[in-house]
Structure formats: C-alpha cells, structure tokens
Amino acid sequence: MIVYDTSLWGFRILLRGHGSALYKAFLPATVSTAILLGIYFGNSVDFEDRSEYKLFDHPYALGVFVVAYTFTLTFKLSFSYNRYWEACTAIHQMHSKWLDVGMEMAAFHLQSNKYKAIMPPAFGEHPEITSVRRQRSRVHEKTAEDVEKHLDSIKEPTTMQWVFNRKKGKSFIRKNRPSFPQAKNINLPGNAPVGKTDAKRRSSGKALKRSKMNKRLQSVAVLDGGIKTKEPALFLQELTHLLSLLSAVAFSTLRNDNEETESPLVPFEPGTPWQPVDPDDVNDPSGGLMIRKEYYRSQGKFWNTTKYLLSISDRSEKGKAMYNLARPFRVIGGVSDAEIQLLQCARGPLAKVALCSMWLQEFISREYLNGSTGPVAPPIISRLFQYTSDGMVGYNQARKVAYIPFPFPHNQVTAFFTLFTIVYLPVLFLTYIRTLWTAIVMNLFASWCFCALYEVARELERPFQNVPNDIPLNNLQHQFNEALQTTYFGFHPDAWWEIEGKVKTPTCVRLPSGSEHNEQLEEAVENLAGDINAEATEGTGLNVVFEDREEAKEET
C-alpha cells in the first residue's frame, strides 16, 4: 500500500513512478499516437480537406463503440475495486474475531485461582456502596504549548516496553511528563452528587445530604496490573503465540508464498519499529528494501525498465520467494522447527491455517478443563470457539479473493477492446480534427486515459499480490502482535480500592404486598429505621435519610 502526500492540491503524487498506473499506460498511449502519425504520413490523402477525406459522415457511428467500451471498462474497474475492498474488510474481520479470543481468554484467566490473592475487590461484595460517584482526575496536565515544545523529545513506548517497565516500578507516562499520584480519593470534593430513589423523586424532591462514605473510600493505582512477576504468565505467552502464529500463517497463504520453500516466519521482537505499509519504503527497519534492490539489480537495469514499461511483473516462483523473503511475518515467541515441519507437511494453504486453528482450539479446551479460565460458565467459554470460527470465516472470505481470479471472459473482452481502442482512436481523431498537432494531443491523452483506467483495474483485482499496491499484511501483523501483548498488562491499574473502617450493611425488609394491617406496616418501619444508623444510610443502597418516623413510613 502506497502512502502518498496530498499537498500542493495532490499533485505531488505525480512524482512517483513505482506502483503507478499512469506511467505504465504511457507506452500504449504512445503506440496509439505513433499509429496516428503512420496513418497521416503514410497516406496520400489530405486529411485537412474534408471534401477529399471523410470516412464517417456522423460521429454517432463511432460513439456506439465508445459507449460500449466505456461500460465494459467501468464494470471491470468497479468489480476490481470491490474485490480490493472486500479483501480489506475480510482480513480486518478476521483479526477482530481472533483478537476477541485473546482478550476474553486473558480476562477469564485473570479470574482463575492463580490470581485470587491479588485480585482487586469487587463492588458486588459491597452492596452498601451505591451512592458514591467515582471520578478520576489528572494532577498535572500539559497545555498545547507544552506539548508542542516537547513533541520532538517524546518517545512513544511500545507495548512490551510498558510491560517490562512496570515490573521495574517505572511509570507508564511518556518521557518528561509528571506521573500520577499513587493514592487519592475516588471522589473529588463537590463533584459527587448523591443519587435519589424513585420514592424520593416522586415525593418532596429535597436534596439529600452528601454521603460520608466518599471520605472513606481510597483508591491506589497499581501500574503493574497486580502481577509482580517479571515475565508474563506462561498461559498468556502460549495464547498470544498461537494467535500470532495463526494470523501469520493465514497472511502467508493469502500472499501466496511458495510451499516448496520455508515459510518466511521470524520471531517478533518487542520494541521494533512498525513495519512499513509501503514495501519499497526507504525507511524499512528490517532491511528488506536492500534485499529486494539487490535482487532487482542482479537482473539488470535495462531488463527491469523494460518489464516496468511493458507492465510485466516478476511472477516467477523464484521472484516471489525472494521478494517475500524480505518481508517475513513476525510471530510472538518465535517459531520452532517442529512447527515449521508440521506446517510444511500440511498440503495446501487451507490445511496450514486449519492446523493452526486446531492448535488454538485444543489449547482453549485443555486449559478450560484444567481451571485456567476460572469459574466462567461453559456457555460463555463456547463464545471463544465461536469467535475462532468467525475469524476463519473472515480468512476464507479473503482467501476467496486471493485464489479466485477475476473472471476470464470479462478480463479477455476488456483486454481485447482496450487493444482495439489503441488502434481505433487515431482514425476517430483524424476524421474529425483537421489540425495534426491537435489530433496528436487529443489522441495521446484519450488513449492514455483509457489505458490508465484499465491498468488501475489490473492493479486492484489482486489485492494480496500486486505490490506495492497490495494490502500491507506485514504492518497489520505487527499491529496484531502489539494488540495481543496488551493481555500481559493484568488488571486495571485503578481497580484496587479499600474502605477505611467497617461499614454496616443495612438489613433489607421485604414488605408484604396487598392490603395489610397498619400494625404490620408500623413494625416494618420500626425494624428498618432501627437497623440503619444515620451515617450508613446516607451513603448506602437505600439512598434515603429518614428524618422522622412519619416520613419513614411514607417513604416505605
């Protein structure tokens, strides 16, 4: 995928030749113009004298072909763009579902007994805390001027740098930025309105007193997610490896890597720069650009230029293998020799991806049966298998585009009439334009336009192979790896809180429905008012302060 600059009204993109359909179409347009000159100078007819030469009496006869060809070319261009966009949609859906598997498995794993000692408290264990509003605040915030001054010195940490830095007690905050306080009240003074019950809203509408509970709740930020070990859990390491391997193998099959050669899978190194979306980016950190340049240089500059002008791409098995070797897919945790051997034994691209999918689902089943997902119910665990299957649906949608070519009949018809247009346009312009130079210019740009649109359709119809206009699979794999490694972060940093002192939980009374005696109502009110002290009532689940027995009776 080519990332281009849209400045200067977008005209700067005209300076790029590699990957351009515009410059590839210039040679056929030049051939069409040469045909025009050959007809003009090779014929004794005076084309400027309309009485002597007039091949067609009316341009409508020529317009029939132009309209028919325009529709044919438009349909091919539209269908090619649809194939390109469908491929983009399919791989994003595939990654979305497989990422859901990783995130949910990590969330379930944190509920297992392994983390019971460090698990944050749950609000469900404290039903008496309901009227407190939790508000987070920033102590130090930079202005736009401060951000502008420090923009060059700010270095964005990678996912794994965050993981390892937190184990050492370092802050996650960007460089040269003050860190957050480690302990603060959940509620800011004056920003925690106390809620009302429906009964209170229906009656007097008086404002309730502020709950004193907000002064007794303390939150402590834990930047390591509560996990004190330096390395992530083996469960999470294996989970991210299997998902990363599944994605990498799927992408390598979509790119149509040669099955006879070793799969271009390499270990993923945290902290490496993003893989470029443009395969010919000069800032490629992997050095792949130099490898590709050396390969093309070995073939000779003249031959490479000729292939480019004739729109002949290097589609040989050796050419694809060498080019893809410089663009390997990175896998979290690396790839073992045994994995490579089994993947090579699986015949066909679908078999390789199915094998990786089976490894992932077997891992989910084994870990669930042995308690790694905690007390999560089986129907919820089944969603993991559903998401894995949904990701395979996205892969097969992308595989449909990668392995089913554009229909041959339509492609052949469009190619034939594009070639016919190159010969047809000179006759058209010589018939109705008297000035030679005007005919040359009009013929050149008209044929150039038609051929360029045809070349655009050819580039888009194969979104996984036509570099550099292909979908940036390497960059998407890199982003997927970084997203998977966020499972190492553990619990939310502000999930830990505690109550200073013990809060008495109110006793709830179920009142009988229907018509009852006044004595029963009086007894219920007395029990309710007697069990709740004034301090607990203001900040607990009832959210009502009973000023006297008559009001309590009315509210009940």
Image (cartoon, rainbow, N blue to C red):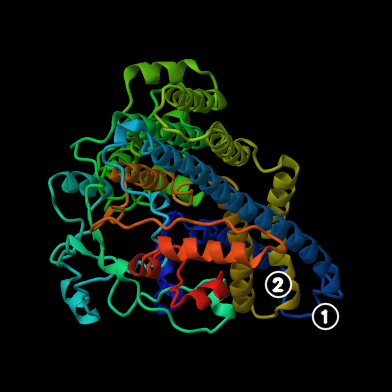
Structural crowding at the residue carrying mark 2, measured as other residues with C-alpha within 10 Å and reported as few (<14), some (14–19) or many (≥20): some
Numbered mark located on residue 374 in the image: none
Residue at the extreme front of the image, as rendered: 519
Residue 142 falls in which quadrant of the image?
bottom left
Tell which circle, 1 or 2, labels the residue nearer the N-terminal end. 1
Between marks 1 and 2 in the image, the one whose residue lies nearer the viewer: 2
- Whether residue 267 is visible, yes or no, is no
Identify the residue shown where x is 52% and y is 34%.
377
Which element is circle 2 on?
A: helix
Relative to the observer, which residue lies in front, 227 or 517?
517
Instruction: Find residue 529 and report its horizontal and vertical position in percent.
Output: 45, 66
Q: CA distance from mark 1 to mark 2?
A: 16 Å
Identify the residue shown where x is 29% and y is 65%.
186
Structural crowding at the residue carrying mark 1, measured as other residues with C-alpha within 10 Å and reported as few (<14), some (14–19) or many (≥20): few
Question: In the rendered view, would you say 240 is above or below 121?
Answer: above
Identify the residue shown where x is 72% and y is 57%.
75
Residue type at numbered disc 2: Phe
- Quickly name the residue at label 1: 51
Name the quarter where the C terminus is drawn. Answer: bottom right
Relative to the observer, which residue lies in front, 372 or 358?
372
Which element is circle 1 on?
A: loop
Instruction: Find residue 221 and report its horizontal and vertical position in percent.
Output: 23, 56
Relative to the observer, which residue lies in front, 166 or 207?
207
Instruction: Find residue 92 and report its horizontal and vertical position in percent.
Output: 51, 48
Residue 97 appears left or right of 11: right
Identify the residue shown where x is 45% and y is 77%.
548
Instruction: Find residue 217 and report its horizontal and vertical position in percent.
Output: 27, 62
Residue 263 falls in which quadrant of the image?
top left
Residue 202 appears left or right of 430: left
Numbered mark located on residue 429 in the image: 2
